[in-house]
Amino acid sequence: MKELDRLRDALRAFAAARDWERFHAPKNLAMALSVEAAELLEVFQWMTEADSRNLEPAAKTAASEEIADVLLYLIVLSDALDIDPVAAAERKMVANAQKYPVEKARGTHKKYTQL
Amino acid sequence: MKELDRLRDALRAFAAARDWERFHAPKNLAMALSVEAAELLEVFQWMTEADSRNLEPAAKTAASEEIADVLLYLIVLSDALDIDPVAAAERKMVANAQKYPVEKARGTHKKYTQL
Amino acid sequence: MKELDRLRDALRAFAAARDWERFHAPKNLAMALSVEAAELLEVFQWMTEADSRNLEPAAKTAASEEIADVLLYLIVLSDALDIDPVAAAERKMVANAQKYPVEKARGTHKKYTQL
Amino acid sequence: MKELDRLRDALRAFAAARDWERFHAPKNLAMALSVEAAELLEVFQWMTEADSRNLEPAAKTAASEEIADVLLYLIVLSDALDIDPVAAAERKMVANAQKYPVEKARGTHKKYTQL
């Protein structure tokens, strides 16, 4: 069984046991995901870029917990919408390869339409 | 090979070919992740909760693309921090089971400390 | 003196007394603003729309504090960029009136280009 | 008349003319505010801190438009909740002065509880 499917099944059981499906409208889950993404952002907000590449242990632990929360809500939301996140990511990788061809995108992070 | 590891390797090759590692400080990647989470949020912002449970095809496609972007940046950020997102999520599931015991959390989405 | 200018001056003095200007790169301030906006979002995340129109006192207090934080960071960021936020908002009101003409926008929140 | 009250009245008339009050549940407005804060964040996401202190004209214009959007939604949301954002900000300034005393906060952006 794939690893995200295993997490999805565990999350379904977790929500069912607590009668939480009623709260899990995709609108609410997208809000929760944004909130967790911001908690992850908060870890880095006053740090230099260089420091963010060499996290102190406490910051790394905090980042790890917020990454977990983002992934968990992403799985619950995808499940509620009947979307396979890995398949969607694989399709996006193909699209990105066309959108940002190597010869035009090398060393610049401008959007392709701006090149 | 696990599915997120496969995506991680593809993303490493994608960034290396474009010389984009220089932009990929965790601080910047956490910003990009938050921006994508907000683009996902935008899909639902004027929708009722009920409508968000029954997306029209165009909205479902849009949600799918933003879910892909969130997952891709989550993988790149985790890789930059040397964090395994699935292992972190599994640890968080264990912690959440203790934080939200079934008998206290049933049917309420208040935080346990508020119960 | 205008009310936002008064807050701006107080915020300048506050940061100077604490030697915080060094942290106040616009990039960092935009991150802090996003984090505060997410904390405001968190107040509403499991609420129905109807409940959000009739907040309990504790939620209203929480919303008020987060609104304050968003406004304060918006002022600090605008000051760092030498942008007048009220003048920018007035220009945007003019642009929005052209973008969303009454006869086309009435009762729909789709973007004008989608109408 | 105060400047934010003037904007608030203009925004009320704008929404009423378009029959948009029905969309303006505080829950939805908090989502819109978060989305705009993320669009502001996006302006800075691949920039160095140093570059963010010296914006090119196109980036400054983009930042100015997003600052306007954040302020406008903050006013609409505050109005929907019957909260005076300037009074809330003034109260927060008093609380922050107690939370971050000069002698402890000088030169560090750690939260006071961490000092």
Image (cartoon, coloured by chain):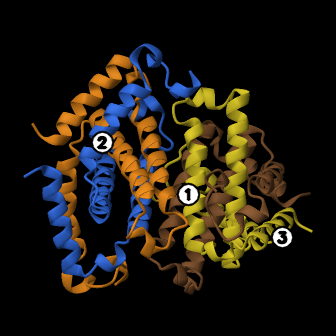
Chain colours: A yellow, B brown, C orange, D blue
Q: Is residue A59 left or right of residue B1?
A: left
Which type of secondary structure does the marked residue at label 2 adopt?
helix
* Chain letter of the residue carrying label 1: A
Choose between C86 and C63: the one closer to the eye: C63
- In the picture, the disc for residue B84 is none
Foreground: disc 2 or disc 1:
2
Q: Can you tell which quarter of the image residue C40 is in?
A: bottom left
Mark earlier in primary sequence (1, 3): 3
Circle 3 residue: A9
Q: Residue at x 39, y 52 (%)?
A: C61
Can residue A114 be seen at all in this image of the molecule? no
Q: Residue at x 55, y 72 (%)?
A: A27
Q: Is residue A61 left or right of residue C71?
A: right
Q: How far is mark 2 from mark 1, CA to CA?
A: 24 Å
Circle 2 residue: D89
Which type of secondary structure does the marked residue at label 3 adopt?
helix
Choose between B8 and C40: the one closer to the eye: C40
In this rendering, the answer to whether D35 lies above or below D101 is below
Q: How far is mark 1 from mark 3, CA to CA?
A: 22 Å
Q: Residue at x 62, y 32 (%)?
A: A52
Residue C90: give x, y in percent of width and height.
17, 56
* Chain letter of the residue carrying label 3: A
- In the picture, the disc for residue A34 is 1
Q: Amino acid at mark 3?
A: Asp
Q: Residue at x 48, y 58 (%)?
A: C43
Disc 2 residue crowd, few under 14, some 14–19, many 20+, Cα 10 Å? many
Residue C50: give x, y in percent of width and height.
43, 76
Q: Is residue A87 left or right of residue D39?
A: right
* Chain letter of the residue carrying label 2: D
| Image marks 1 and 3: residues in contact by CB distance under 8 Å | no
Q: Amino acid at mark 1?
A: Ser
